[in-house]
Amino acid sequence: MTDVDAVVVGAGVVGLTTAITLAEAGLATRIVTAAPPAATTSATAGAIWGPVRCGPPERCYGWARTGLDVLSALTDEPAAGVHQLSGHEVRASPKEPPAWTDLLPDMRVLGPGELPAGFAAGWRYTAPAVNMPVYLEYLLRRYEGLGGSVTAETVTSLAAVAAPVVVNCTGIGARTLVPDESLIPVRGQIVVAENPGITEFYLDHGNNGADYVYLFPHGDLVILGGTAYEDATDMAPRPDVSARIMRDCTAAFPSLRGARVVAERVGLRPVRPSVRLEAESLPGGRLLWHNYGHGGAGVTLSWGCAAELTSALLAAPH
């Protein structure tokens, strides 16, 4: 039927991580993908560790804890593009920190004198931040070093993929491929600018509205955002949105005034009431594993989901 044990469909952060984990467990794998890693939603992420826009909370907590351990260890690998980053989240209305912040040893709630003007709550912590284009290239090289291959191919039927095990890591593509109408695209847009010397992250959720403000420094560059537009699927950067992002980020960090814009990027978060991590049978005794719907937490959840999927696959009777 095929020369591999499993074919992973999709080469974003979830697909690459899953393929690496399977390969490191001794399975022969290959990836087929409609878009190369650099052209996936993953490439447009901020990205700092944190299980946001995903569910269910208790499962995501466990997956996120695995991700925190793995990403923290990768800060020692220069080629991975991962670094520990300190900063703060703020809220305009009173709110408790999310439960997952208890995984971060230095997390603390900000006192009234530490909050920026106009904010009612906030907390400070350090977490792994990921320079996504660098990280995706690192994952690709790591996978190829394990003997894995990545082939450009548009899959129109998961059942038609020739392999004993097919792993669906297609992100928002699963909406039409599965199909799964519970999977909603949530459009994100970022601006990449030259960093004037900012060393800490900043995240203002804007009371969970469609427009909010964040900033993640990655060395000489800084990622500015952001948006969360449900059911919007246009992929060209919107000039008015980029202008709003620059305005709001500059208001929070005046040193950004006049900073040169290097790039603008758009991605569609695959948001679902709960991550879909489960297997179903295919004809001929084959198996289809679904691993999609990670919302705004693909990087955060990827290692935990990959580990759970791999353990289940190895434990299954052959």
Image: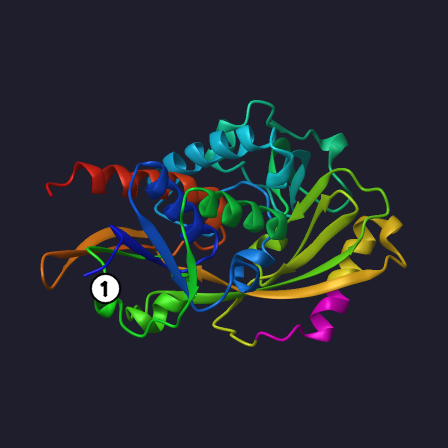
Q: Position of residue 74 (x, y in %)?
A: 56, 33
Q: Is residue 241 found inside the magenta-colored segment of the image?
A: yes
Quadrant placement of the C terminus: top left
Camera sees residue 275? no
Residue 64 placement, left or right of 277: right
Which residue lies at the image location 45% right of the left edge and 46% below the top edge?
Answer: 143
Q: Position of residue 259 (x, y in %)?
A: 86, 57
Question: In front: 176, or 132?
Answer: 132
Question: In front: 302, or 233?
Answer: 302
Q: Is residue 107 found inside the magenta-colored segment of the image?
A: no
**Residue assigned mark 1:** 162
Q: What span is colored magenta in the figure?
A: 235-244
> Looking at the rendering, which quadrant does residue 109 occupy?
top right
In the displayed orientation, state which residue is furthest to the top: 105
Check the image and report above or below for 298 versus 122: below
Residue 166 placement, left or right of 215: left
- Tag 1: amino acid: Ala
> Looking at the rendering, which quadrant does residue 285 occupy?
bottom left
